[in-house]
Amino acid sequence: MIKACIFDLDGTLAYTLDSMAAVGNMVVRKYGLNPMPVENYRYYCGNGADMLVKRLLIDAGDPELVHYEEARALYRKEFDKDPFYKIQHYPGMPETLKELKKRGVKLGVCSNKPHEAAVKVVERMFGDHIFDAVMGQSETVRKKPAPDGPLKIAGQFGVLPEECMYLGDSGTDMQTGKAAGMYTVGVLWGYREKEELQENGADDLVDAPEDILDVYEEKCKG
């Protein structure tokens, strides 16, 4: 029986590449480096803001990461000012979340996005009544693929890991869900390819948000 669904944020609940690229490219320009195409950010993100900055700097022309410490602080500062640039939820996601909520499912978000930004984005996209818990990157919880975040959320909900479905769009998310002992679902509308999700242990794949309801029903039957 599935009692809770825990979602990744970037590429799973919401399209956020433009917001990351706008800040990231502003940062590299400050150091006379090359701004990167928005599509590159599909591969920079997924392992937290600090790793995003490292990957970006290397591609932008700083392979020795000379500017890393200053750039990571600047990225966080500027991103926190306005994390909403061109963000949008994926079509059908609000309706799917409301359906899950109607069925008594607890809903959580576990993101490697800095915690303050994650909370702001979730509330802007979905309001403050849909999700029962939102957890972003912080000093107190190891970032994904460590299972700490999903397990902490499950504990807050009072449910067992095996009663949770964990949903994300990257190999990191699949590793996270499996490490947490949760039924792990890869979403195919996000930033990474189907093969990456399968290679990292996805228990199931969904093509559209409404398909999550079908997976939920199947798991409840089982």
Image (tube, helix red, strand yellow):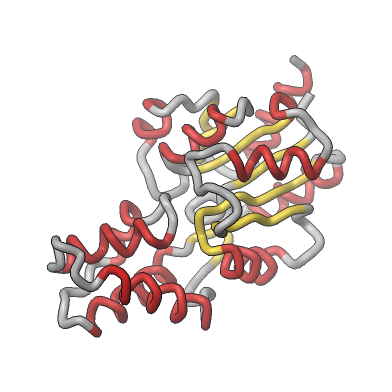
Is residue 90 in sight in this rendering?
no
Is residue 89 in sight in this rendering?
yes
Residue 13, quarter of picture: bottom right
- The x, y position of residue 202, in whole percent, is 49, 27
- The x, y position of residue 126, in whole percent, is 70, 63
In this rendering, the answer to whether 131 lies above or below 33 is above
> In percent of the image, x 74 and y 47: which residue is there?
107
> In percent of the image, x 53 and y 64: which residue is there?
114
- Residue 158 shown left or right of residue 53 in the figure: right
- The x, y position of residue 138, in whole percent, is 56, 59
- The x, y position of residue 199, in whole percent, is 37, 26
The quarter in which the N terminus is drawn is top right
> In percent of the image, x 40 and y 50: which residue is there?
191
Q: How many marks?
A: 0
- Residue 21 shown left or right of residue 202 in the figure: left
The quarter in which the C terminus is drawn is top right
> In percent of the image, x 59 and y 63: which residue is there?
115
Residue 5, quarter of picture: top right
- Residue 17 shown left or right of residue 6 in the figure: left
